[in-house]
Amino acid sequence: MPIEKVFFWKNNSEYWIDEEWIDYIEKILGERRILLSAGLWAHYYGKRFNKKNSIVFADSGGFQYLRMSKGKQREFYKSRERYYKWQISVGDIVVMGDIPSAGEVPVNDLIRFLRYTKDNVDYQFSLDSNLGSRLLGTMHGISPYSLRIWYEGLKNYSKIGWAIGAKPASNLIGFALQFLFLYENGEFNKRKLLHVFGVAGEMILLPLAELIRRIDDSIVLSVDSSSMGLGKIGSVWLSDGSIMHFDDIRSGRKEFVLLDGEVLRKIPEKVGYVLGRKIALTSSVNYMKYWKRDIHTVITENGKIPDSRYVLVDKIFKLWKTGGIDAVWFNFCRGKLTKKDEVLKGRSVERLV
């Protein structure tokens, strides 16, 4: 579970996550697993982080880097010591210091991002030579050619598993290609952990989980998503997995039952800390309980997921069994490349033939 600032406390020398919130995570999800990102938390380096028995997934902040201006990106490299020292000091699972491509990009750009990433990972290992015992590798790119370039650059670093992060996050094919590429290269023969960045929507996660299950049901699938924190955009999760907007409450059309039993029939334009925390806690608990259900029960619920999504899984699976990831790539991505990217297509054609 990603941690919002409403569940965060600090004093002059230390900081910690709200104990009540951590208790709910443990009660519902079975373990105190939380996500903190170096892109958002590294400025607390130097203060003591009181873990309260939690297991911390320490993200690299790579996607925050993408949203930075060019000047801020240069500043990142001046201060990355703080980013990665913080990440390695708090993380039970540490994400490779990736600078993501955020989708399919021209080869020169991909190689540049890869060069930055390798430099970051070398720096991470300089901080902890045993980092491989808790490091997750990251995959970027979508085409077979791009995936090969990225993978060849990072495959030899010791690690406990991989994380995939296709963009846009609504593109099931991108996630499928990244997973299938890793599987084809034997990455799940020994390491069984696969993390999926930023996806917990039913239309992507459930079909992807079904595809992974069909290919290797021993893989441990981990996901994160900031979607549980909808309060900052004026929405809440309900226990049935649906979303209610604050405007529905303000208009009198709906009401929202908080964890303490209070029924929220009106909500001010400016939500203060106390009420905001109650709303965020209730919404997040609803979200966790909904996703804690057995995934196959979720998949088979009538009308929950359109049959077309599972027709798509069937198609991906059959194409892959027939011609590997090249067959999947050409069926779904053919014709969508610019002229500058034709070299990607050409190299993949050679591999397919």
Image (tube, rainbow, N blue to C red):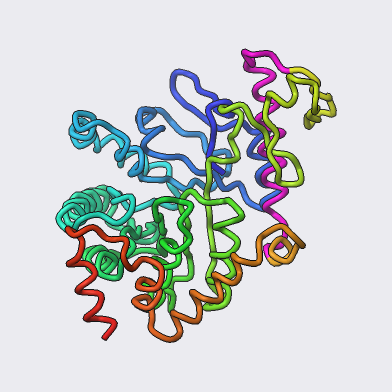
The range drawn in magenta is 267-295
Q: Is residue 310 left or right of residue 44?
A: right
Q: Quadrant of the C terminus?
A: bottom left
At horizontal 33% and vertical 56% (from top left) the residue drawn is: 131
Residue 171 quadrant: bottom left
In the rendered structure, does residue 89 fall within the stretch colored magenta?
no
At horizontal 39% and vertical 65% (from top left) the residue drawn is: 178
Nearest the viewer among 176 and 136 is 176
Q: Is residue 69 visible?
A: yes
Nearest the viewer among 316 and 34 is 316
Q: Quadrant of the N terminus?
A: top right
Q: Is residue 274 left or right of residue 119?
A: right
Residue 82 quadrant: top left
The image shows residue 165 at horizontal and vertical percentages of 40, 55
The image shows residue 133 at horizontal and vertical percentages of 38, 61
Residue 191 quadrant: bottom left
Q: Is residue 163 left or right of residue 281?
A: left
Q: Is residue 27 visible?
A: no
Eyeballing the image, is 325 above or below 12? below
Q: Is residue 271 left or right of residue 343?
A: right
Nearest the viewer among 231 and 346 is 346
The image shows residue 69 at horizontal and vertical percentages of 25, 31
Q: Magenta stretch mostly in which secondary structure? A: helix
Nearest the viewer among 132 and 182 is 182
Q: How many marks?
A: 0
At horizontal 17% and vertical 67% (from top left) the residue drawn is: 343
At horizontal 72% and vertical 33% (from top left) the residue drawn is: 282
The image shows residue 279 at horizontal and vertical percentages of 69, 27
In the rendered structure, does residue 281 fall within the stretch colored magenta?
yes
Eyeballing the image, is 2 above or below 190? above
